[in-house]
Amino acid sequence: MSDKKCSYEVSDGVAVMTINNPPVNALSAPVLKDIEESVKQALNDDAVRVIVLTGAGDKAFIAGADITEFTDLQERAKATEFLSYGQELTSVIENANKPFIAAINGFCLGGGMEYALACHIRLADENAQLGLPEIKLGIIPGYGGTQRTPRLIGKGRALELILSGNFISGTQAAEYGLVNRAVPAGTVLEEAKKLAKTIASKSKLNVAAALKAVNEGVEMDLKQGLALEGQLFGELCESEDKVEGVNAFLEKRNPDFKDR
């Protein structure tokens, strides 16, 4: 039996990627390595159209880093280098040409929340607990929490979470805009898979273009963003899937996209 701490299974174009590091799916160096391998494999797997990221069991999505690895981080250069690997991996997820959906079950703290923030869409169990408690350890978030959180929910609410280290529920996270929505207890993976299957039914070309337009466009001014949108729209109009999509609509049938 494999001892990998992160693996995925594919069904109907949806890869359910599960982090399995009992008891709370903490992010140790070996876990991060397994996540990296699974992410890269899924992105290169033609059978995978959408990735759902979740934690094994019902206790935790990812309850933060393995704190024992912090004890030797006493030099500035070593600590900065320690962070670079996790930061690079969150950027790979955020900039992927396939959508990642975080199915947040249970504790989603510190590095776990930062990995959820890197996903394109986040669903949370209404009773999940989310937070950035690093300040209680005498440090700050280091896998993008200080950068992605204010970009997502605004400076004030981000600082409230970061400076207090307090946890909020999945329901509160939805009210903050930290997650797309909170769902009834015990249903988050089912709801994430349902959404993933909807997205997986679309053309890969269109999904990748939409991801590119949004991810790159938000870093541009409006004029540049509109130009990018127009460029991508024009490219898609030359595709077979555009012809199929329009014809299917006019003929009142479901489209049969071929990803070309």
Image (cartoon, rainbow, N blue to C red):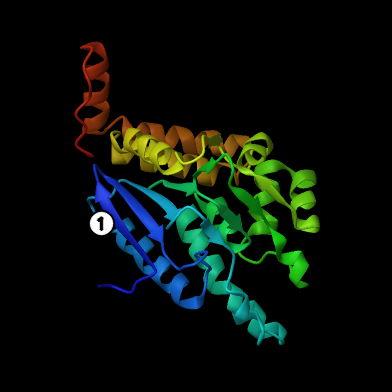
Give the labeled residue for mark 1: 45
Residue 83 position within the rendered picture, expressed as x and y whole percent measured from the top left: 60, 73
Is 53 situated left or right of 257 in this image?
right
Residue 116 position within the rendered picture, expressed as x and y whole percent measured from the top left: 54, 52
* Residue drawn at point x = 71 percent, y = 61 percent: 133
Q: Label 1, secondary structure: give it.
A: loop
Which sits in the foreground, 251 or 75?
75
Amino acid, disc 1:
Asp
Q: Is residue 123 above or below residue 167?
A: above
**Residue 81 in sight in this render:** no
Residue 126 position within the rendered picture, expressed as x and y whole percent measured from the top left: 57, 39
Residue 221 picture quarter: top right
* Residue drawn at point x = 47 percent, y = 70 percent: 32
Q: Is residue 60 above or below residue 6?
A: above
* Residue drawn at point x = 51 percent, y = 74 percent: 28
Give the total of numbered labels: 1
Residue 254 picture quarter: top left
**Residue 159 in sight in this render:** yes
